[in-house]
Amino acid sequence: MSGTVITLPESSEATICLQLTGTITADDFTTYFDIPVQKAVEKHGYYNLYIYYDLQFEGWSREAADLSFKCISKYSPKAKRLAYINAPDSRMLMMKMLSPIMQAEIRYYKEEQKKEALTWVLSYKP
């Protein structure tokens, strides 16, 4: 079990809800992002993400960042809703650069909007 990624109880087969803290490693990324996204796409044909960056979030290891970019490149056409709470500037910049291949609705929220973000991402109906 990772100390840097917490799977939130609101997660479902197609919606991955995570809290991030500290520095995300390649193992964290594979376990909590890559594998769940693959499973969601295989079973449902899409996925949603709710990512809460807590105040102790420090960033991604180089290896995790590389894996994240590869995963986004591969699975972005299958994303439907992406909600980021307290997203660092680097995440917002990367998502903006990838916007030509992203088909998902992407929203950014502040700390006090966590519930609103969760309601929005969970309200997706295929």
Image (cartoon, rainbow, N blue to C red):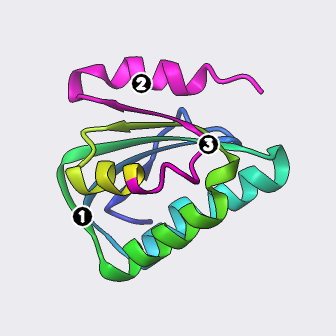
Q: Which quadrant would the N terminus be assigned to in this image?
A: bottom left
| Position in image of residue 86 (x %, y %) | 24, 39
Seen from this angle, which residue lies furthest right?
Answer: 43
Badge 3 local density, few (<14 within 10 Å), some, or many (20+)? some
Give the Cα separation between the discs numbered 3 and 1.
25 Å
Q: Is residue 89 found inside the magenta-colored segment of the image?
A: no
Residue indicated by mark 2: 117
- Seen in the picture, residue 72 relative to 120 is either above or below; the reply is below
User: If you read the primary sequence from the N terminus, does the residue marked by circle 2 or circle 3 appear first?
Assistant: 3
- Left or right: residue 94 versus residue 106 is left
**Which amino acid type corresponds to the residue marked 1 in the rendered image?**
Gly
Seen from this angle, which residue lies furthest bottom?
Answer: 63
Highlighted range, magenta:
97-126
What residue is rendered at 83% in x and 49% in y? 43
Query: What label does residue 59 carry, if any?
Result: 1
What residue is rendered at 54% in x and 72% in y? 70
Determine the secondary structure under disc 1.
Answer: strand
User: If you read the primary sequence from the N terminus, does the residue marked by circle 2 or circle 1 appear first?
Assistant: 1
User: If you read the primary sequence from the N terminus, does the residue marked by circle 3 or circle 1 appear first?
Assistant: 1
Query: What label does residue 31 carry, if any?
Result: none
Marks 2 & 1, CB-CB < 8 Å contact: no
Determine the secondary structure under disc 3.
Answer: loop
